[in-house]
Amino acid sequence: MTATTAPAPAPMARLTDLRPSHDDIAGDVLEGLSASPKQLPSKYFYDARGSELFEAITRQPEYYLTRVEIALLDARMDAIARAVGAHAHVVEYGSGSGRKTAQLLEGLRDPVAYTPIEIDRGTLLASTARLAEAFPQIEMLPVCADFSRPVELPRPGRATGHTLVFFPGSTLGNFDHPGAIELMRSMRATMGARGQALIGIDLDKDSATLEAAYNDAAGVTAAFTLNLLTRLNRELGSDFELDGFRHHAVYARERGRIETFLVSRHEQSVIVAGRDFRFAAGEAMLVEYSHKYTDAGLAGLAQVAGLTVVEGWNDPRDWFGLRLLQPA
């Protein structure tokens, strides 16, 4: 009788926990509500429920971005792997469920380590556990943090060829242009002189397609947006009435972006962290930007940040693109 050897268990992920504190969240929210017009930071959409709702959004028929990007990664992975090279330390900003990550790690040449940076701890640990099981040869070094601020990376146990920042989903579009430049400068510092960034961008297209993607008929995106108020009620003791606001997203072509608002249904007052904020009937509170890009527009932002676009891949309809950047 031949003895069989059980497969080696996946290595334990080493978590670095840098979650925003209560004071961080309160400070950001109070600053936004004190602005004119009022706004809330979209990075706080992603508590456990928000992450679940976003995954549901990606499966709505109107929301083309995820399925087109997944198909693009699948179709062009060989070319991407050649351009990236071997032995990368993959660092993902806003890793979410890790569906696209699995495609990337499977397709790259001997990636050494993977560091997802995600603001929701539960989502981070769940996706890291799935990836650790699927890729036991890759060291998992998750970081629970706000990736929009500089994060010191954990050091892999094995030598790496270079760092690859992976930023799919056109999440770059959630930042205004100064914020996108600042984030790309942070990427440049993270990747180092020999590093790269693989960024997903939603390309400019007709308004009807864009607006449908952010106002799905099933109302999942509306539930996702309103869940931000639920989170603030829970974590900051605010008293937003969810029935008092409605979701509204519109494409502002002159600014090249979807603008998502929560609109007050009537005159009302809301207490947040002990402060009183008044809303007029019909007052729109900005909760998210989603910029749409041209190649010239992205190249201009990258240049200011000290980066240059070296490779690019689009889907057959030119709806979505992946761009590989490196320090200029």
Image (tube, grey):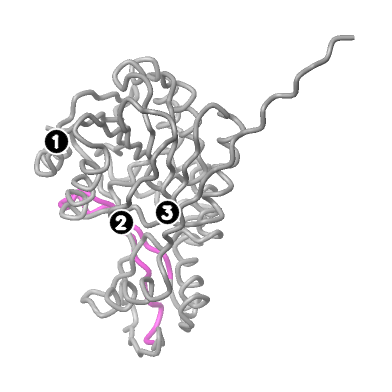
Secondary element type, mark 2: strand
Q: Which of 130 and 256 is in front in this view?
A: 130
| Of the pair 267 and 314, the residue shown nearer to us | 314
Residue 250 is tagged as 2
Q: How far apart are marks 2 and 3 (CA)?
A: 9 Å
* Residue 198 marker: none
Which quadrant of the view contains residue 30? Answer: bottom left
Instruction: Tell me where residue 53 appears, x and y as whole percent.
Output: 53, 54
Q: Indicate which disc, 2 or 3, sits on the residue closer to the N terminus.
A: 3
Q: How far apart are marks 1 and 2 (CA)?
A: 25 Å
Magenta range: 246-268
Mark earlier in primary sequence (3, 1): 3
Q: Which mark is residue 299?
A: 1
Q: Which amino acid does label 1 sit on?
A: Ala
Vertical order, 189 against 10 (above or below)? below
Residue 283 position by quadrant: bottom left
